[in-house]
Image: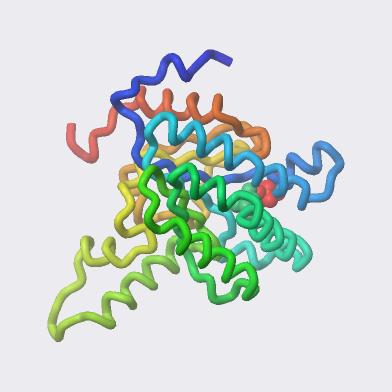
Amino acid sequence: MKNYKDLISRNRIPRHVAIIMDGNGRWAKKKSLPRAEGHKRGAEVIEPLMDSAIELGIKAVSLYAFSTENWLRPQTEIFALWRLLEYFFKTRLEKIKGRGIKIRHSGSLDKLPSGTREIIKNAVEETKNNKKAVLNFCLNYGGRQEIVHAVNSWLEKRKPGEPITASKIEKNLYTSGLPGVDLLIRTSGESRISNFLIWQIAYTELVFLDVLWPDFGPSHLYRCIYEYQNRERRYGGI
Ligand code: FPP
């Protein structure tokens, strides 16, 4: 693979990169391992990813860790994912804090086991003053549900006769305050959005990469950014 890091222009780094971390199950299957091992390896990829993102000056990374549709998976796999998240924060929170990363959460925590919920809330609280970069965990997240949630939040504050606008929806999204999503990456060769950040990606550059998520490393991030920088963004203009 080319050394994409050296080919990247430091002047046009995406501010916010969103990632659909797909292919954990296939990675495990290829190695005759249980699916949970694929998720475990998938979680280990996050730290080097954030290190290289910070080094490049990326301001926010959103990770699709559990969708509202993932409840259809076997209970054992779902529980393994919650345990993995708990382990991730128990073992990495101090490092995350030290690196200036702010943890955010997008989605509804309501249905999560109470222990997992508390660990995530604690990570958000403990890192709330960090400024270097945001790591946004999308958990029990769905794009359509997010828009409905945003509209309902706005309705609670609405003055009689006041119309809804795009900017009012935007302000009530889970991602409110984060930079716009410049680049969305999906691993594993699938070319679908799967209900991820559907409002936010109206003008986002999409990169579909034929690499299983547990194999994703900084070199793949550089390649995706290089691809992003070689696209012309016109936002509907000419
Ligand atoms: C999709 O791959 C991946 C998920 C549904 C879960 C993603 C979760 C992680 C990478 C780990 C999360 C943990 C932390 C600490 C963030 P898949 O299982 O659908 O793969 P497949 O399509 O090959 O079966």
Question: Nearest the camera: 96 or 173?
Answer: 96
Image quadrant holding the C terminus, namely top left
Outermost right residue: 32
Question: Nearest the camera: 207 or 34?
Answer: 34
Image quadrant holding the N terminus, namely top right
* Picture colour scheme: rainbow
Where residue 41 appears, as percent x and y from the top left, is 71, 42
Outermost left residue: 161
Question: Nearest the camera: 18 or 191?
Answer: 18
| Residue 175 placement, left or right of 50 | left
The quarter of the picture where residue 189 lies is top right
Where residue 135 appears, as percent x and y from the top left, is 47, 49
Total tally of numbered discs in the picture: 0
Residue for point 59% across, 65% down = 119
| Residue 138 placement, left or right of 84 | left
The quarter of the picture where residue 154 lies is bottom left
Residue for point 66% across, 37% down = 212
Where residue 231 appears, as percent x and y from the top left, is 34, 26
| Residue 222 placement, left or right of 175 | right
**In the rendered image, the vertical position of residue 208 relative to residue 71, given as above or below:** above
Residue for point 51% across, 63% down = 141
Where residue 84 appears, as percent x and y from the top left, is 69, 56
Residue for point 29% across, 24% down = 11
| Residue 155 placement, left or right of 192 | left
**In the rendered image, the vertical position of residue 66 relative to residue 133, given as above or below:** below
**In the rendered image, the vertical position of residue 70 relative to residue 238, given as above or below:** below
